[in-house]
Image: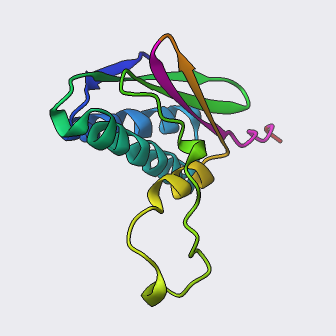
Amino acid sequence: MESLTVPGRLDSLERIGKYVMAAAAEAGLEKAAAYRLRLAIDEIVTNIILYGYDSGRHEGNVELRTTLEDEALTICVEDTAMAFDPRQKAPPSDLDAGLENRQIGGLGVFLAIEGVDRFDYEWVNNHNRNIFTMHRRPVAAPK
């Protein structure tokens, strides 16, 4: 699958979502896994745009590259915003509290990382690389 490069703006999220779902379909992911992958990438890219590119005050692109292997689908999201490793963000401290007692916000990055089978981050050549991996279910041999 070819890569996708879009401007780091909120109106690019629709194209990114379609790209992710096409990659998930090509990989044969189940609907729930495809949805979790799309949600995770959407959350991280939204944060890149809102905080890394400061809602359009700083310009930059977001590039997505897909690797499809027998065991897994991997999508790498790369940007030129300031370095930010989502794994370093502490999970919300009130996860066990009832909804009425929880603070608003702070859950998106946690859910993004927890929603995929593997999440990695790299800072390479002044680029953030957020790497999302979903395992593919083995295809049963014909009987």
- Between 101 and 9, the one lying in front of the other is 101
The residue sitting at 45% across, 61% down in the picture is 106
* In the image, residue 22 above or below residue 33: above
Q: Which residues are magenta?
A: 126-141
The residue sitting at 81% across, 37% down in the picture is 141
Where residue 14 appears, x then y in whole percent? 25, 41
- Between 16 and 124, the one lying in front of the other is 124
Where residue 101 appears, x then y in whole percent? 47, 87
The residue sitting at 41% across, 17% down in the picture is 3
Q: Quadrant of the C terminus?
A: top right
Residue 39 in view of the camera? yes
Q: Is residue 111 left or right of residue 51?
A: right
Asked if residue 76 lies in the magenta stretch, the reply is no
- Residue 42: image quadrant is top left
The residue sitting at 17% across, 34% down in the picture is 56
Where residue 115 appears, x then y in whole percent? 58, 54
Q: Is residue 56 left or right of residue 33?
A: left
* In the image, residue 34 above or below residue 68: below
Residue 11 in view of the camera? no
- Between 131 and 103, the one lying in front of the other is 103
- Between 50 and 28, the one lying in front of the other is 50
Where residue 91 appears, x then y in whole percent? 58, 60
In the picture as drawn, the residue positioned furthest to the top comes out as 125
